Image (tube, helix red, strand yellow):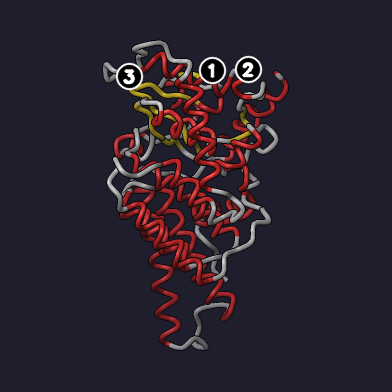
């Protein structure tokens, strides 16, 4: 049997292990409805798109028990409580510090339960921990739910904040009135992080920075596409193939530099080729009909093409050394508690 490329194999095996969960898979008819709903939202102008509502609605496709209106009211209540602390004519820095205090400092405003990084699930092995509603309930999150809540609340209180990415991690970009842009690490109590520190911590090629796949403030539409990744990962964990392809292609129409979308396509096309054909026939030999052999070759070509597109923008697979360093930082953080 032909072996998957290292890039595709890493993504397939990594994600399959990382998203063990018990959420029921939607019935096939739901995939079309979900796709149309996401498509309609992504076609809205940035000024109309509500990132909080989009996030909750999309994540309800993973967990149907999520009550979108109830959770939107929770967000509205949090916004009201934060705004109530503003002095007259508060500037953006005052608003920023109020948001950070509300989230990360224990007090009656958060039931003395500050929002914290979940050190018990550092690799995101439980997909529910990435859901905004779960984070609101548990006050424990990760590099998906934590920056998502920060940006949703920040935008609603008048801050110029958005998501940004580095390899396998999401953080926040904040712009003040002077136009100065800062990195904010929501997984570390909302502290500021210099670009040079981010580069030391995360493996990034110079090309990836020039092409803008990392460290760049995302538009609201691009931020929404980052949220779509969680649904793509849910599809992957459950072996959903064509809807995953359709959703990844939709994501790339609205965020052409979205490398994760390219990797999902590479992995899915590779999975289709390997599983649907190689496992059925063991190899593309004469037992395959010409039509089946041509389809296999096309799937294989698509997988390699999307993998190469990601690499052409500066993406590289994570090294074992980087993975080990990340786990060491988690262990050090646990020991410091």
Q: Are marks 2 and 3 in contact (CB under 8 Å)?
A: no
Q: Count the marks: how many?
A: 3
Say which residue appears at 45% left-offset and 41% top-offset: 52
List x then y, in percent, for residue 306: 38, 58
Crowd around label 1: few <14 · some 14–19 · many ≥20 (10 Å): some
Viewer-side label of 3, 1: 1
Picture residue at 40% right of the left edge, 54% below the top: 262
Precedes in sequence: disc 3 or disc 1: 1
- Please tell me which residue lies in front, 77 or 181: 77
Tell me if residue 55 comes above or below residue 337 in the rendering: below
| Closer-to-camera residue (317/105) | 105
Find out whether the residues at labels 2 and 1 contact each other: C-beta distance under 8 Å: yes
Residue shown at the point (55%, 64%) measured from the top left: 3
Q: Which residue is mark 2?
A: 107
Mark 1 and mark 3 in contact (Cβ < 8 Å)? no
Give the percent coordinates (x, y) of residue 93.
Answer: 39, 15
Helix, strand or loop status at disc 2:
loop
Residue for badge 3: 176
Please state if 20 lies on the left or on the right of 84 as rendered.
Answer: right
| Residue 228 versus residue 107 in the image, above or below | below
Q: Is residue 258 above or below residue 293?
A: above
Q: On residue 75, which mark appears?
A: none
Numbered label attached to residue 101: 1
Compute the Cα span from label 2 to label 3: 27 Å
Q: First in sequence: mark 2 or mark 3?
A: 2
Q: Position of residue 281 (x, y in %)?
A: 56, 81
Q: Secondary structure at mark 1?
A: helix
Position of 119 compared to 260: left or right? right
């Amino acid at each position: 049997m032909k072996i998957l490329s290292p890039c595709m194999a890493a993504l397939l095996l990594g994600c399959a292990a990382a998203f063990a969960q018990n959420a029921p898979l939607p019935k096939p008819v739901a995939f079309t409805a979900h796709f149309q709903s996401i498509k309609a939202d992504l076609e809205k102008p940035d000024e109309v798109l509500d990132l909080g509502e989009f996030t909750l609605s999309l994540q309800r496709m993973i967990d149907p028990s999520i009550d979108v209106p109830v959770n939107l009211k929770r967000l509205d209540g949090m916004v009201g409580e934060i705004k109530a602390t503003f002095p007259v004519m508060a500037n953006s820095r005052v608003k920023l510090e109020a948001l950070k205090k509300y989230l990360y400092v224990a007090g009656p405003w958060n039931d003395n339960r500050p929002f914290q990084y979940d050190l018990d699930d550092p690799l995101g092995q439980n997909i529910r921990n990435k859901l905004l509603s779960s984070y609101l309930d548990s006050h424990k999150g990760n590099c998906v739910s934590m920056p998502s809540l920060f940006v949703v609340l920040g935008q609603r209180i008048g801050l110029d904040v958005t998501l940004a990415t580095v390899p396998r991690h999401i953080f926040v970009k904040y712009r003040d009135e002077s136009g100065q842009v800062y990195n904010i690490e929501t997984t570390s109590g909302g502290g500021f992080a210099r670009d040079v520190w981010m580069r030391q911590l995360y493996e990034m090629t110079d090309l990836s920075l020039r092409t803008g796949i990392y460290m760049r403030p995302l538009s609201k539409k691009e931020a929404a596409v980052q949220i779509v990744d969680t649904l793509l990962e849910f599809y992957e964990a459950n072996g959903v193939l064509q809807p995953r392809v359709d959703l990844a292609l939709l994501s790339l129409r609205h965020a052409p530099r979205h490398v994760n979308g390219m990797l999902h396509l590479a992995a899915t096309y590779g999975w289709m080729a390997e599983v649907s054909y190689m496992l059925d026939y063991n190899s593309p030999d004469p037992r395959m009909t010409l039509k089946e052999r041509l389809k296999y070759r096309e799937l294989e070509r698509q997988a390699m093409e999307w993998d190469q597109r990601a690499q052409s923008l500066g993406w590289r697979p994570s090294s074992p050394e980087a993975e080990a360093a990340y786990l060491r930082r988690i262990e050090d953080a646990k020991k410091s508690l």
